[in-house]
Image (cartoon, helix red, strand yellow):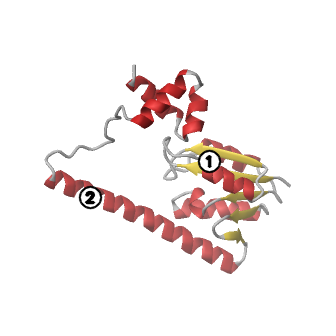
Amino acid sequence: MTVYGYARVSTAGQSLVGQKNNLKEYGAEIIISEKYTGTTTDRPQFDKLVRSIKGNDTLIVTKLDRFARNTREALNLIDSLLQMKVIIKVINLGTIDNTPMGRLIVRTLLSVAEMERDLIIERTRAGKMFAKQHNPNYKEGRPKRKKDSRNQAIFEYSKSHTISNTAETFDISTRTVSYVKALFK
């Protein structure tokens, strides 16, 4: 009986540290993590975890939406894990029971999470459209990195440390470290 933890963030710039710490606190022995969008069900590390998990194992996630952001896909996955007798624990929710009430709660919460995601997308699109119409200087995308004191500190630290170590120390992605190093070259 193994206790697995699964952590996921959607973009390379986000940190997994908080989720991993929560999973450890709740007893995860093996933590699988990845930086992959929840809008797709093709998540390599999670797929590998699901293939290796066995009955009476436990799977812990920090939030229900870590399974997927699509209600149908998440329900199929949760149902198949429950049929295998896998114990599913969601840190901000509790243990998912294979009972009519447990399944109702999961369906409801997944539907709300999917609706929330759709509303965020709608509001973002509307905000971009408004900005394009009312701001002649509007540009999509991230603003260019600046040679500020934080980036200077990252660059200086990276001179004597590995990219991975620098990323971990500053709680940023390795890609960000590479961008900062290129900024000062």
Which residue is drawn at the image coordinates 55% and 71% (left, top)?
Answer: 109
Please indicate whether residue 119 sits to the left or right of residue 89 in the image: left
Count of marks, rendered view: 2
Please indicate whether residue 128 sits to the left or right of residue 170 in the image: left
| Residue 78 at x, y percent in the picture | 66, 62
Task: Check disc 1: other Cα within 10 Å, few if <14, some if 14-19, many if 20+.
Answer: few
* Residue underneath mark 2: 127
Residue extending furthest toward the bottom: 101
Look at the numbered disc 2 and give the secondary structure of its residue.
helix
Name the amino acid, label 1: Val
Task: Check disc 2: other Cα within 10 Å, few if <14, some if 14-19, many if 20+.
Answer: few
Please indicate whether residue 54 sits to the left or right of residue 156 in the image: right
Please indicate whether residue 179 sits to the left or right of residue 171 in the image: left
Look at the numbered disc 1 and give the secondary structure of its residue.
helix
Image quarter where the N terminus lies is: bottom right
Q: Quadrant of residue 83?
A: bottom right
* Residue underneath mark 1: 17
- Compute the Cα span from label 2 to label 1: 31 Å
